[in-house]
Every structure is written in structure tokens, then in C-alpha cells.
Amino acid sequence: RRDFVRELASSKTVVAPFGWGEPTIFRDYQTFLAGSLLVKPDMSHVETWPDLYRDGETMVAFSWDVDDLTEQLDEIIASYERYLPVARAGQEAYRAALAGTGAPEAFAERFQRVLSDG
């Protein structure tokens, strides 16, 4: 596990395709924590809480048919400095979620809203 975390932290980019559902929670969150750039299929159709999957803000999306994945990765590699703020924003958003939305009151409030809207 230590080797995996070290490898992840030294990676500039992590491609995280869908797992059992859109978010690949552990890999996505590990990527955010490591400060690497998360690259995954477009998640704009899914409402998540916390909202961590914002293309171009906290992660980089590619199309479901993977037609643009090579282009995306080539662009990221060629101008990685331009993507560093996105990787940092993803890390900051995840850390803020751990610190803030993890509070029992916030969870209870969110849960009540979901039940009320459903």
C-alpha cells in the first residue's frame, strides 16, 4: 500500500475510468489527496455530493467513447503547468469536503433535503 500511495503521489495524472458506477470513489479520492490530476469520463450528468467532479476546475473529463482521451493526455503532458491549478483545486475541494461536509450536521441536513426532494 505504501508503494502504491508513493507512486500515486509522484504521478502527474491518473486516468480513472468508471468502476461500478460513474465515480470510482477510492481511486478518485486517492488521486485528489495525492494532488495528482484526475482524468475520467465526463461526469456532468451526475449530481454528486460533495461536488468534486467539475471539468476544467477540479478534474479533466474525456468522452465516454474515449475518442478524445489520447488528445487530452497529449495536451496535459505538453502543457502540464496549465493543469496544475486544476489538480490543486481538486485536492483543495476534496480536503474542504473532508473538513466541512463531513460534519454530522451537514450530512443530516443533506440527507433531509434528499428525502424531502424525493
Image (tube, rainbow, N blue to C red):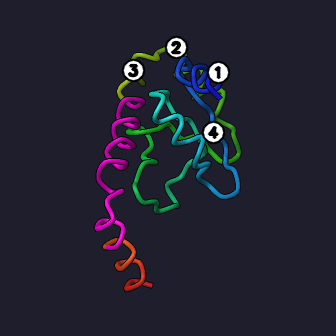
Q: Earlier in the sequence, mark 4 or mark 2?
A: 4
Q: Position of residue 43 (x, y in %)?
A: 53, 52
Q: Please, is residue 77 above or below residue 40 in the view? A: above
At label 3, counting other C-alpha atoms closer than 10 Å, the crowd grade (few under 14, some 14-19, many 20 or more) is few
Image-based side of 26 in relation to 115, left or right: right
Q: Nearer the viewer, residue 24 or 100?
A: 100
Residue at horizontal 36%, vertical 67%? Answer: 107
Residue at horizontal 47%, vertical 38%? Answer: 59
Label 4 amino acid? Ala
CA distance separating discs 3 and 2 = 9 Å
Instruction: Tell me the quarter of the image containing the C terminus.
Output: bottom left
The residue at the far top in this view is 78
Label 1 sits on residue: 3
CA distance separating discs 1 and 3 = 28 Å
Q: Please, is residue 118 above or below residue 52 in the view? A: below
Q: Quadrant of residue 91?
A: top left
Q: Position of residue 17 (x, y in %)?
A: 67, 43
Disc 4 or disc 1, which is closer to the eye? 1
The local secondary structure at tag 3 comes to helix
Q: Earlier in the sequence, mark 1 or mark 3?
A: 1
The local secondary structure at tag 4 comes to loop
Label 3 sits on residue: 82
Asked if the stretch drawn in magenta spans residue 66, the answer is: no
Instruction: Tell me the quarter of the image containing the N terminus.
Output: top right
Q: Earlier in the sequence, mark 1 or mark 2?
A: 1
The local secondary structure at tag 2 comes to helix
Disc 4 or disc 3, which is closer to the eye? 4
Residue at horizontal 36%, vertical 80%? Answer: 112
Label 4 sits on residue: 16
Label 1 amino acid? Asp
Label 2 sits on residue: 78
